[in-house]
Image (cartoon, grey):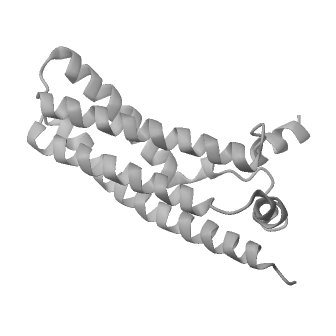
């Protein structure tokens, strides 16, 4: 099978961008585990630098997503999306099933709850509150970019997982 230059670029960007994103995710989970412990111990001197590092990692992850998707929609439709369907992958494939991503989301929920509680109680230094706000902004920016990318490639947002559920309803 011959693939066009456009498709070659798409595959390279898609794979490289996702591989680098996964490295960021692994480091994020390491920092998040340390952050969770620091918050539990009320070690606010350690919390602020960890929040700052996580904000930067979220920004880097957003850049990886943008890089991974910087190719024409036609290459996604003709090659990338079909590579995530049978016979290459199980029906209903979704990145939502990535255990490292799920761990990151779980840790972020726990940390957000703990930090917001501590901020409301007034026990958190101002610099920690500012760093937490920067992290939440970076996370929000990441989500917004992900939605834009999804809409670029799949207008209306019908994921492979949704297709699977609809076909098997």
Q: Is residue 144 left or right of residue 122?
A: right
Q: Is residue 154 left or right of residue 96?
A: right
Occupied quadrant, residue 121: top left
Q: Residue furthest top?
A: 121
Q: Residue at x 75, y 79 (%)?
A: 5
Q: Nearer the viewer, residue 141 or 96?
A: 141
Residue 128 screen position, x and y as percent: 17, 34
Q: Is residue 56 left or right of residue 143?
A: left
Q: Residue at x 62, y 40 (%)?
A: 147
Residue 53 screen position, x and y as percent: 26, 51
Is residue 129 placed above or below 105 in the rendered structure? Answer: above
Q: Is residue 127 visible?
A: yes
Residue 78 screen position, x and y as percent: 84, 64
Q: Residue at x 26, y 41 (%)?
A: 36
Is residue 154 placed above or below 17 in the rendered structure? Answer: above
Q: Residue at x 76, y 57 (%)?
A: 73
Q: Is residue 43 visible?
A: no
């Amino acid at each position: 099978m011959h693939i066009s230059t456009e498709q070659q670029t798409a595959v390279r960007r898609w794979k490289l961008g996702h591989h680098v994103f996964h490295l960021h995710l692994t480091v994020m989970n390491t920092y998040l585990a340390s952050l969770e412990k620091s918050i539990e111990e009320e070690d606010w001197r350690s919390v602020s630098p960890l929040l700052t590092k996580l904000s930067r990692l979220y920004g880097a992850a957003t850049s990886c997503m943008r890089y991974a998707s910087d190719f024409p929609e036609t290459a996604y439709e003709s090659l990338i999306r079909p590579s995530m369907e049978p016979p290459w992958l199980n029906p209903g494939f979704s990145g939502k099933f990535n255990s490292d991503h799920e761990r990151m989301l779980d840790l972020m929920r726990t940390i957000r709850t703990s930090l917001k509680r501590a901020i409301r109680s007034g026990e958190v230094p101002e610099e920690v509150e500012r760093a937490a706000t920067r992290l939440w902004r970076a996370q929000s920016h990441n989500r917004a970019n992900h939605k834009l990318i999804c809409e670029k490639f799949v207008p209306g947002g019908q994921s492979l997982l949704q297709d699977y559920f609809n076909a098997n309803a």
